Every structure is written in structure tokens, then in C-alpha cells.
Image (cartoon, rainbow, N blue to C red):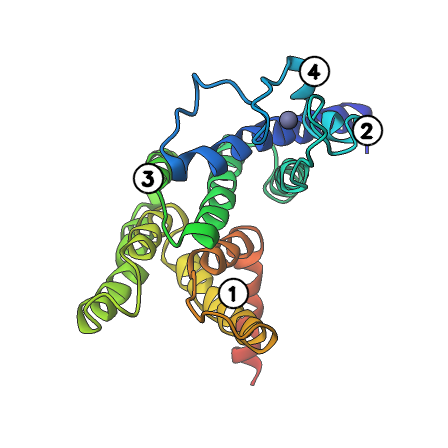
Amino acid sequence: MNPITFVLFLFVFLYGIVIGSFLNVLIYRLPNGEDIVLKRSHCMKCGYILKWYDLIPIISFLFLKGKCRNCNDKISLQYPMIELLNGIFYLLIFYIKGFHITSIIYCLFVSTLIVISIIDWNTFEIPIGLNYFIFILSIIIFVINIENWIPHVIGFFAISGFLFIIYLCSKGRAIGGGDIKLMAVCGFLLGFKLIILSFILGCIFGSVIHLIRMRISNQDNRLAFGPYLCFGMFLALLFGNQLISWYWNLLMIS
Ligand SMILES: [Zn+2]
């Protein structure tokens, strides 16, 4: 790897962890309806207002050994993990998709999927603002790919329409409205092939992991579908086209 490429990837990673630390803010504040911009970051226990040097992604956590500077209360490992994960995801996206404007959109898309996954996992709700944000991203992708617009329009309805029918038949018991809206806007962004693949992957992961979870703990069997759908979309975005052509070749040979 030449030095310029290395520096570019380093910047991508740094952007990833800085935005990752903003994702933590969204994850904690959106479900409570707190202000995401004006309110200063503070310790959840003692209310200590964090200084700039307490807010450096990953570094501050390591330096403070995961404890509040003021009251020594433990800081959740989730903060540095989300920052690191977002940084790694940004690296992967730029590595696979190349240095292109769409890679920036895909990074923001994947970041939103992280926030949706964790909020849905904790609260069984997907804040509507996050769906709106993905819709804005999908319009940008749509405009960039305007000569290839049809798969995106079909993608909007491909899975969301199917889920909406299930929603109507089960009177809203089998599937949440949040999942339907999510699959509509994400289908618009990804196009119909990738959204169908995402849905299949999400169903496979969801059923396997859910069965394991129910075996391990006998507690409530409520399923948050969002995280599995998001994971399916992440894989489909990065590897979907290769996966589809591999499967297609397999069909052709047999
Ligand atoms: Zn504290």
C-alpha cells in the first residue's frame, strides 16, 4: 500500500470513530427524546459535564480505564465498541467500494443501521427520524444513479409491500410498522435485488439467533427484527452482488 492510500484510509478510520461517538449520543438520547445537539455530554450517574479531553473517541475511555473522572462509576464498554465498530465499517466500505462519493453515503447509511439496531434491540421501536434520514440518503443515491432508477423504485416496494400484507393479515401482531418503513426506504437505497437478499439474510440470522436466545434464557420471546434486518443489509451492501452472481453461477452449472 502506498503512503497516500494509507493516509486516506487512516482518515476514513478517524472519521469513522468520531462519527461513532456521535452515534452513541443518538443511541442514548433519541429514545428519551433528549436534545441531541445542545445538551452537553455528562456522566449518567453523577452528572459531571465531560470536558473535551474526556470525549476523544476510544482514547479517553482507555485513558480513564472505563471510569468516570469524577465519581469513578463504570462507563459502558458500549461507547468505545460502537466507535471502533463504526471506524472498521467505514474502512471496509471504502476498501470494497473504493474512494467514491457513494461510499460516503454508504458510510452514513451503515452508521444509521447501527443506531437503529441498538435502539430497536433495547426499545422495540425505530425512531421515525432515522427512517427519514435513510430516505434522504437514498434520494442522493437515486440522483447519482439516475440512469439506473428502476431497480430502486421496485426496491422501495419489494419487501415493504410484502411485509405490509403480513401486517394487514395479522392486524399488526406479526410485524411492526417500523420494520415496514425501514424496508421501504432501505429498498429504495439498495435496489430490489439487494433488499430481497437482505431480507432473506435477516430472516435466517433472526430465526437462528432467536432460537438460540430462547434456548439459553427462558425469558420473553419477543423479537426485535430490526437488528437482524440491519445486519442483512450491511452484508448485502458489501458482498451482495458477489453473493448473487455466485448463487446464479451455481444455478447455471447444476
Ligand atoms: Zn460520574
Q: Is residue 28 left or right of residue 53?
A: left
- Classify mark 1: helix, strand or loop: helix
Q: Position of residue 188 (x, y in %)?
A: 33, 48
Which disc is residue 244 wearing? 1
Q: Secondary structure at mark 4?
A: helix
| Residue identified by numbered label 3 | 135
- Amino acid type assigned to the residue bearing label 2 in the image: Asn
Q: Earlier in the sequence, mark 4 or mark 1?
A: 4
Q: As displayed, is residue 182 above or below residue 28?
A: below
Would you name the residue on which mark 2 appears? 2
SS at badge 3:
helix
- Answer few, some or many: residues within 10 Å of disc 1's Cα (few below 14, many 20 plus, some between 14 and 19): some
Q: Is residue 225 left or right of residue 110?
A: left
Q: Is residue 64 above or below residue 251?
A: above
* Labels 2 & 3 near each other (Cβ < 8 A): no
In the rendered structure, the answer to whether residue 139 lies left or right of residue 92 reads: left
Mark found first going from the N terminus, 2 or 3: 2
Type of amino acid under label 4: Tyr
The N terminus, quarter of image:
top right
Query: Which badge, 2 or 4, is on the more N-terminal residue?
Result: 2
Q: CA distance from mark 2 to mark 1?
A: 32 Å
